Image: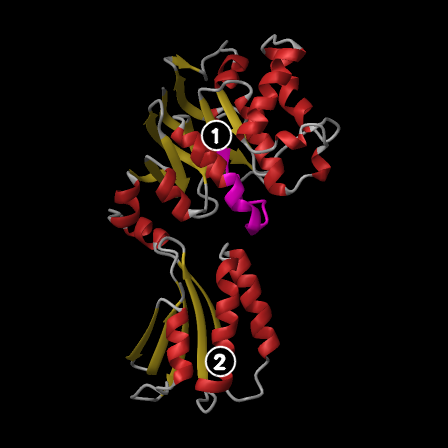
Amino acid sequence: MISIKHLSKTFHNPDGSVITVLKDVNCDIEKGEVISIIGPSGTGKSTLLRALNMLEPPTSGEIWVDSENIMARGYKLDKMRRKMGMVFQNFNLFEHMTVLENITYVPVRLLNKTPQEASAEGMELLKKVGLAQKADVYPESLSGGQKQRVAIARALAMHPEVILFDEPTSALDPTMVGEVLSVIRQLAKDGMTMLIVTHEMRFARDVSTRIFFMNEGIIYEDGTPEQIFEHPKRSATKAFVNRIQKLVYEIDDDSFDYLQIQTGLNQFFIKYNIPEKADVAYTIIKEMLFEQLSDIRPLTLRITHADLSGETALDFMAEGLTESPLPHNDAVQDIRSRVKAIVEEPTTRGFRIKIILN
């Protein structure tokens, strides 16, 4: 369906320096594939999508869509853009138009649909993304997640063969990410061909038929979700997919600032889209610091979250100890009943108590 050959993109800075963002990218994309593009920031993921629909014309190479080279002189880009929809990070809705007008405007102008036809189809698309009741409101009254769902409906209104998603959840409040991802999941089930630049690793693993890991301006590794996430061939891929986010506090004495810890925890759980784990984490940390381990100082508290597995844990490190400081009482048994597991283990520094949250 799409064939990319030796694609490159360079930018020339005012000072005369040259930045090469894409370097000899090659791949073939088949109809019905759902490809998630992952990788560190600045490695060309979004530039690749923008190059595909010529929003950022490549410096060299070829892009073949349905056996036509869209970079050839004289090719009419409107023809390609009717086949290839795009959903941006920041929605790009027309603020002076209602939700329904945002969806019907281009089909009326470019697909020669009557306003009645476009409106009827637009309402069906709004039902598909769960926003039929918002047809007559203006975008300013919508949440970020609702705006992005409207943007998806607008892309679908052109009957594209492919949809490109450029980090569709990056501008959203974490509480709204799920509603957008659920719409994309349904499109995948419906057989829509999609390329998705995303930092949502678990979503990429679950929804994709194929993963591109981009690094240093190239497709560094290309494979199935199982291969990329469970058996990566290259060390850079392995390091990226196994990322563990962490938050660390050193508690030297009883004068530590618990309110600061609470604020940091709240930001951590929101940032990594796991707010449902916050309440139990707050409660357990408070019980451990002020009751079960109140006599243990210094103490290191570390909160970790693995992007891929979704495992969230609370680590309490007691320096210099050779045995677990955790008492065996009813309160500790109660904590055990509220979590997935409690692991007590010696380390080179002392003794660690790891509490894995459900």
Does residue 68 appear in the picture of this structure? yes
Q: Is residue 269 left or right of residue 185?
A: right
How much space separates mark 2 and mark 1, taking CA atoms? 47 Å
On the image, the x and y values in percent for residue 247 come to 48, 68
Tell me the residue that label 1 is attached to: 164
Question: Viewer-proximal residue, 284 or 213?
Answer: 284
Q: Is residue 66 left or right of residue 85?
A: left
* Residue at 59% across, 49% down: 173
Quadrant (top left, top right, bottom left, bottom right) of the C terminus:
bottom left
Q: Is residue 201 left or right of residue 181?
A: left
Count of marks overlaid on the render: 2
On the image, the x and y values in percent for residue 343 come to 31, 74
On the image, the x and y values in percent for residue 275 come to 52, 58
Tell me the residue that label 2 is attached to: 287
* Residue at 42% across, 61% down: 305
Instruction: Name the kind of residue labelled 1 in the image.
Output: Leu
Among the two numbered marks 2 and 1 on one chain, the one whose residue lies closer to the N terminus: 1
Which region of the structure is painted magenta? 164-180
Q: Is residue 201 above or below residue 295?
A: above
* Mark 2 burial class by Cα count in 10 Å: few <14, some 14-19, many 20+: some
Does residue 214 appear in the picture of this structure? no
Question: Viewer-proximal residue, 128 or 272?
Answer: 128
Mark in the foreground, 2 or 1? 2
